[in-house]
Amino acid sequence: MKSSLTPLGPPVSRDRIIDTLPKWYTPDACLQLREHFHGQVSAAYQRRNTGTVGLKLSKVVVVGDLYVGKTSLIHRFCKNVFDRDYKATIGVDFEIERFEIAGIPYSLQIWDTAGQEKFKCIASAYYRGAQVIITAFDLTDVQTLEHTRQWLEDALRENEMGSCFIFLVGTKKDLLSGAACEQAEAEAVHLANEMQAEYWSVSAKTGENVKAFFSRVAALAFEQSVLQDLEKRNSTQPQVGDGDLIRMEGNSSETQESKRPFSLGCC
Amino acid sequence: MEEPRVREEEEDEDEEEDGEDEAGPEGALGKSALQLTAEDVYDISYVVGRELMALGSDPRVTQLQFKIVRVLELLEALVSEGGLEAEALRLERDSLRQEVRALRGEAPPAGGQVDLGPDKMVVDLTDPNRPRFTLQELKEVLQERNALKAQLLLAQEELRCYQSGLIPPREGPGGRQEKEAAVPRPRSADHRKGERTIMKKLPRCPGRLGQGCKAASRRPGVEGTCVGQGHLPPRPPTLGSTMRRMSCTQGQPCSQLGAVKGKTKDKKIWY
């Protein structure tokens, strides 16, 4: 059974496999204090009960001032590279990162938006439908932290109230240390609480916390998707999900091979 | 235009001097004060000295001679200084003339000042980096780029599938042909073989994705590598029909949300 549920197509690399809920950066500003996935998530997995289209991918939008390092952060995570040269993002860019969370294939569609004011009208068209909003700022530039309020407001305007996970991310952590870092983080944590966001400090240059951060993002988004999906199915059409899956599995005209693309095609 | 004229003036002056030389030392006395040179003063000195000599050795003449020499010295100093100043002024005048001419040439042909509104911008048409393209054009290029990138990601996944052996590099003739038969195509077997290369598959990829999961399950050999419609963030404009089916508005990126909302309205998986 497991073979039909594990991610198909190219196998997910080892460091994209998440079995337990990754921990927060600081308990002072975090979205979820639990250390394990919600009971229903693992239960659903046990029952092979999660195979819907909607589950498999979340849209993540990264916003923030120019030159805070949004692109660097994404490139460090998705490509494990760091480019010293600054190249402003034109409009928007995106990456797709595949995970296997609690045994279920899951992907993040990460939208990298331009920080330059002149591209705002283009980038903002891509805010809609975000499950996760990441507002990034430069830990060494307090102004960029102040601007995150506006960035978040703009991103939330395109989304339904309360439908998004919000993360506040301080970048260029490698440039700060000791008291200065603590001071910057304290201010950011304060703002994160105001925003109802989870706070993280990262460095794309050294890679510090980058993987942990995105794993956390993916896991929380995944968990929310599973729970919402279960809720819908239980409240509206309790048998639809199972029925679908049974029909698929029981479709004897198709061989085992056919389930692989199904999972892929829908993930 | 100007320089030749200056030269002409100088030549005129030279000619005058030449003429004066020809007239002998007495000619210097006939000159205007502004044209007098140090040379002329020496000529005057010669003429005056000669006439004083003719007056004899009267002590009153000798007295007068000292005074005359002194006056001539003063005159010589004034003439020399004046000549230098005149030369400096002439040079300055010439350079100023050239400057004026250059400025007049640069000035806009008519009207002079251009009155722009508060939200207007002047564009230098000779600047190779001047703004050229419209917002709409940039949006379209971006959408196209994103669509191509999505296809590239799909192709890379597909390639990895082959590389990792998840999809056999060559489908067995029986299995493949059965699948092919499900979707009739007016192609011969020879053509079909060529189509299996990734390059040739690519353009069809979004269309196949648009068919959704059921199609994917029906045609595992081909669809297996597609990440799924939800993974194709932006739809290229050529997918007009697919986009409409997915309720994507034009100019908006077609996100997973949009696609799912459009397809499974009744289920409302996403909020």
Image: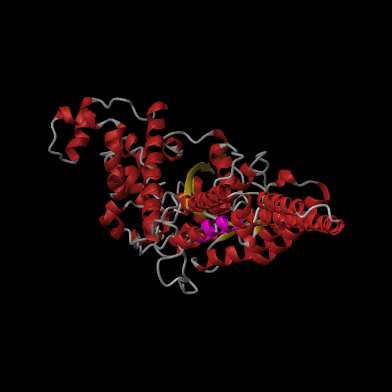
- Please tell me in which quadrant of the rendered image residue A149 appears: bottom right
Q: Does the magenta stretch include residue B77?
A: no
- Please tell me in which quadrant of the rendered image residue B242 appears: bottom left
Q: Which residue is rendered at x = 62% and y = 39% of the image?
A: A84
Is residue B249 visible in the rendered image? The answer is yes
How many numbered circles does the render carry?
Answer: 0
> How far across and how far down the image is residue B108, in percent?
43, 65
> How far across and how far down the image is residue A206, in percent?
67, 38
- Seen in the picture, residue B195 relative to B209 is either above or below; the reply is above
Is residue A263 visible in the rendered image? The answer is no
- Magenta part of the chain: B92-100
Color scheme of the displayed model: secondary structure
Q: Which residue is rendered at x = 64% and y = 63% of the image?
A: A147
Q: Horizontal placement of B156 versus A223: left or right?
A: left
Q: Does the magenta stretch include residue B96?
A: yes
- Seen in the picture, residue B133 relative to A266 is either above or below; the reply is below
| Foreground of the two, B96 or A210 | B96
Q: Which residue is rendered at x = 54% and y = 37% of the image?
A: A79
| Foreground of the two, A244 or B19 | B19
Give the prevailing secondary structure in the magenta stretch.
helix
| Foreground of the two, A73 or B83 | B83
> How far across and how far down the image is residue B261, in percent?
38, 61
Q: Horizontal placement of B12 versus B125: left or right?
A: right
> How far across and how far down the image is residue A24, in percent?
68, 51
